[in-house]
Structures are given as structure tokens and as C-alpha cells.
Image (cartoon, helix red, strand yellow):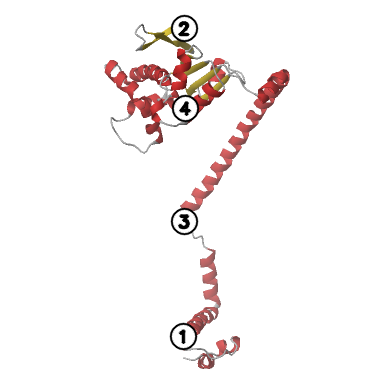
Amino acid sequence: MELRSLQMANPVLHSSIPDLPRTTSATTQIFGAQLRFLEIEQTHIRLSSSSRNTLALRLKSPREPMGLTQEIVGDEQKSTVLTQSASDLFTKMKDRFLSFKKDKYLANIEHFKDLANAQEPKFMVIACADSRVCPSAVLGFQPGEAFVIRNIANLVPSYENGPSEVNAALDFAVNTLCVENILVVGHSCCGGIRALMSMEDETNSSSFLHNWVVIGKNARSNTKAIASKLSFDEQCRHCEKESLHHSLLNLLTYPWIKNKVVEGQLLIHGGYYDFVDCTFEKWSLGYTKSSSMVHNQYCIKNREFWS
């Protein structure tokens, strides 16, 4: 149907749409579709006032169920509470920082100016990420005294495991900063060790936690063999120390660490912090050359118990 005949048939359309030039059949079909849509729109416009009121009420009605609306409001309230809580925490953090600046930084300004130019820590500390075992708080390290890296279960992967943030830190601390001591600190009630002891044998997993703690699988195997008759909690405690032993030995798989230990330029230590009764056990890994010069021997020495 041509455009002009449609206009004559519908006076409303005729009054509102100007004459348009004739077009090809394909274009006419497109315009025809547009005009039919306009006819529908005009029909809606001529709805009775009562229909319009009904339509308005429908448009004003909520599109989401009341349960969803209440859930959104509830989430907003929770977000407000969370934001306020975070604000309070940062206020406390600000106060602690300003106290640090006043009591330590400004009181020892020359020391901190020297640290701004270079660092010469005597210790590298490898500790667990557990919030209860901060090595600076527990062992009193001050800025510049310890190069610290923390991970789940204070694990040290072997050299053969390939690149990781732990051996990158070892490389920097030993070869660039030339630390004189490496201290690996384990602790009681370690969730990472508990995860290690809980995992299934030879199970593939997409869990980041599982794929990290599996580094300690040899410690887990030794614990299962030695302490199989103990309760699970006691096995975990045993593995916390067994894992420390394996991490100390894993340090010696790094050529630049082993060489410095052999030459007496670097010492390796283990530590175990029991935060249940606040005790600390410390020992060192001794190195002895065998007479045959083929096998080197390592032993525990200088064990101390602080309570």
C-alpha cells in the first residue's frame, strides 16, 4: 500500500505526517512498518481516561518483588555499618601511625634518614601470614632490622620448585642485602598445616591453598608415619615442627644459600612460637664437613626455650 493512501485512510496520520516522496517497494515496506507502529501508538493515545489511570498505576507499581526490595535495603544498611566500622578502624590506625611518628620516627630521625638511603638488615625472617604471629610484634624487630616475607604456613619451597615470591625474596635478601641470618618461624594452631594434614592423598585441586601447602607433603608423610596413633590435633602440632625442619633443609637446596652456609657467611635458624601459652623455641642448623668430603652433615644446635 502506498504512503498517500494510508494517509487518506487515517486522518490522524494524515494531519501529523507530511507528504513524502515515492520510494521503491523495499523502502515502502519499511515505511509501512513504521506507519503501522504509529497507528498502534495513536490507538494507545485514544485510550479512555480510566484506562490511562489504570496504566499509570501499573507503571507506578514496583517491578521487583517486595522481598528483593527488602534485601536491597538490608544490604545497604549492612554496607553502611561496614563502612562505619572501616572508618573507625582507620581512625585507630591513624592514631597509631601518628604515635609512631612522634615517639619513634621523630625521636630517631637520623636513624630513619639513614634507612631512607639504604637498608642493611641482619635477619631475613620467613613467617606465617597468620594475624596472630607478626614477627615484628612478637620478636621486637624494629624498622631496618629484618627483611620479612610471610606466607601460608611459613613454607620454603625447594630450589627445584621454580620461581615463587619466596625464592625471589631469598635471592634479594641473601645476594643483594647480604643478610647474615635466615630465621624460619612456625607457630601453634597453624591453619595452613591443618589444611595440609586434611588434604586427600594424590588429589588434584584447583584450590590455591591446596596447591601451596602441598609443598609440605613430605612433612605430612613423615608425620603420618611417626604420629599415626596420635589425635588429629596432636598430628597437626607435630607437623608444624616437622614442616619447619623440611623448610630449613629446603633452604640448602639453593646454591647461593648452601655456599654461604658452607663458607660460614650465613646462619640458618628455626623458631616455633606457641601463642597459646606464649613460649618461643629457637634452634640453629649446624653444618659439619665429613672426613670423606663427599657427604655433608647437618644437625640441630644451640636449642633454646624462651618462656
Q: Secondary structure at mark 3?
A: loop
Q: Is residue 136 left or right of residue 270?
A: right
Q: Nearer the viewer, mark 3 or mark 4?
A: 4
Residue count near mark 2 (Cα–Cα under 10 Å), binned few <14, some 14–19, many ≥20: few
Q: Secondary structure at mark 2?
A: strand
Find out whether the residues at labels 2 and 1 contact each other: C-beta distance under 8 Å: no
Graded by Cα atoms within 10 Å as few (under 14), some (14 to 19) or many (20 or more), the crowding at tag 4 reads some
Which of discs 1 and 4 lies nearer the camera? The answer is 4
- Disc number lying in front (4 or 2): 4
Dot 1: element: helix
Classed neighbour count for the residue bearing mark 3: other residues with Cα under 10 Å, few (<14), some (14–19), many (≥20) = few
Q: Residues within 10 Å of mark 1 (few under 14, many from 20)?
A: few
Query: Which residue in the protein does label 2 denote?
Result: 304
Query: Where does label 3 land, which residue?
Result: 65
Residue holding disc 1: 26
Residue 70 x, y percent position in the rendering: 50, 50
Q: Earlier in the sequence, mark 2 or mark 3?
A: 3
Q: Position of residue 31 (x, y in %)?
A: 51, 84
Looking at the picture, which amino acid does disc 4 mark?
Asn
Asked if the residue at tag 4 contacts the one at tag 3, i.e. Cβ–Cβ closer than 8 Å, the answer is: no
